[in-house]
Image (tube, helix red, strand yellow):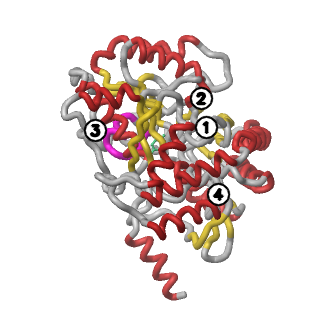
Amino acid sequence: MIYSNDHAAFDRQHLWHPYASVTKPPPVHWIESASGVRLRLRDGRELIDGVSSWWSAIHGHSHSALTAALRVQGEKMAHVMFGGLTHGPAIELGRLLLDIAPAGLEKIFYCDSGSVAVEVAMKMALQYQQARRQSEKCRFLTVRGGYHGDTFLAMSVCDPAGMHTLFSRVLPEQLFAPRPQCRFGEHWQPDDSAELAALLAKHHAELAAVIIEPIFQGAGGMWFYHPQYLRELRQLCDRFDVPLIFDEVATGFARTGKMFAAEHAGVSPDICCIGKALTGGCLTLAATLCTAKIAQTISQGIPGLFMHGPTFMANPLACAVAAASIKLLLNSNWQENVAAIERQLRHELEPARNLASVADVRVLGAIGVIEMRQPMDTAALQQFFADQGVWLRPFGRLIYLMPPYIISTSDLTQLTAAACGAARLQAVVSNGAQGWAIP
Ligand SMILES: *Cc1c(COP(=O)(O)O)cnc(C)c1O
């Protein structure tokens, strides 16, 4: 007992947690193990993981098919470098990915995390333009309200209200169209893409690429927008000969009800980033896919090579568990499972709309969002959620649910009841000077 107290103190004193202070550390739960949708705390309590551990554990935790894949691969080899070597798990995963990826994507670059997949995509676009002797095309256009990761080029295309000011001296200045206003499921408003069209018309000669999260903007505001926006963006990119990058790191692997969110619009990107749910939440792995045209152009330029190559590229353990996760998904009834979660989220979150503290309720696929009018005291809510037996992590004015697809109706009801209860609590905080929304 003395030891365990010391261990908790060690965490508080020495371990940095995401977006946190290490001198005034936020409260944390100590998780001993996890299985299915449940996280087991050291004191024996259980919490239902309502956010799939940052949207990755789509099959729940410790799924036997995934732990078996890890064990089998671990006994063969945990890792070999990918420079000059290859292996079965990388090839098998590649085949599975090309079978399900948006049409036209043929080449795969494996990398470490979603942010790195975005860096790789942006580097691909830059090398593509250089290979075409158009190296002046080196800026990126995106929309406000986006999130693409925490590394530098990725940060430069995140919503400028976020961390831009902190790093403004080193971040390249990109171009921002307004956040798409027209919602998913509403009537399309033709003027929604007007400013985007104007920006492309004016700046296409300096643009390396356009980057956007298709249909669902995640950590930048949990917002669903109209598929027509993507269709018009695809047309604009074609007209002005600007490559289009989709960041499917959050949306990939069925989260919005389609295998990839691009399918809602029936369009394909030239470059596509995937991550998060790729390994079913077991290990860090991401990938950047591109068309043959992008790959061939890069390869015909100078130096004719794509200049990126992480140490742990195509890690065999991660590739093996990713392949197992995709097979598990394809062999499950995922369309019906996600549709059932969507129906239940709509039904059970809708009553929150009547609360004076609630600004909006929105649902798509296995994503449910309650947007509050005021920022919330997330530390107080963490205690409230633990008392309700759930793990949810609201940020800013947003309480959201992204459960594993295997969740039972009664467990999902426990989550939605806790989310609505939190909305009723209205634990409001005056959110400091910056008012940052920390996911
Ligand atoms: C989470 C996320 C990233 C960053 O992924 P990491 O694995 O955290 O680096 C990039 N883009 C989107 C859309 C994301 O949701």
Q: Are marks 1 and 2 in contact (CB under 8 Å)?
A: yes
| Marks 3, 2: nearer the viewer | 3
Q: Amino acid at mark 4?
A: Gly
Q: Residue at x 44, y 72 (%)?
A: 11
Of the image marks 3 and 2, the number of the one nearer the N terminus? 2
Q: Are marks 2 and 4 in contact (CB under 8 Å)?
A: no
- Tell me residue 367's x, y (percent): 65, 42
Please say whether residue 262 is one of the residues in the magenta stretch. no
Range of residues picked out in magenta: 148-157
Q: Nearer the viewer, residue 9 or 431?
A: 9
Please say whether residue 149 is one of the residues in the magenta stretch. yes
Of the image marks 2 and 4, the number of the one nearer the N terminus? 4
Q: Secondary structure at mark 3?
A: loop
Q: Is 7 located above or below residue 47 in the figure?
A: below
> Circle 1: is it few (<14), some (14-19), or many (20+) Cα within 10 Å?
many
The residue that mark 2 highlights is 263
Cα gap from disc 2 to disc 4, whole angstroms: 25 Å
Q: Secondary structure at mark 4?
A: loop
Cα gap from disc 1 to disc 2, whole angstroms: 8 Å
Q: Which mark is residue 306?
A: 3
The residue that mark 1 highlights is 259
Q: Which mark is residue 60?
A: 4
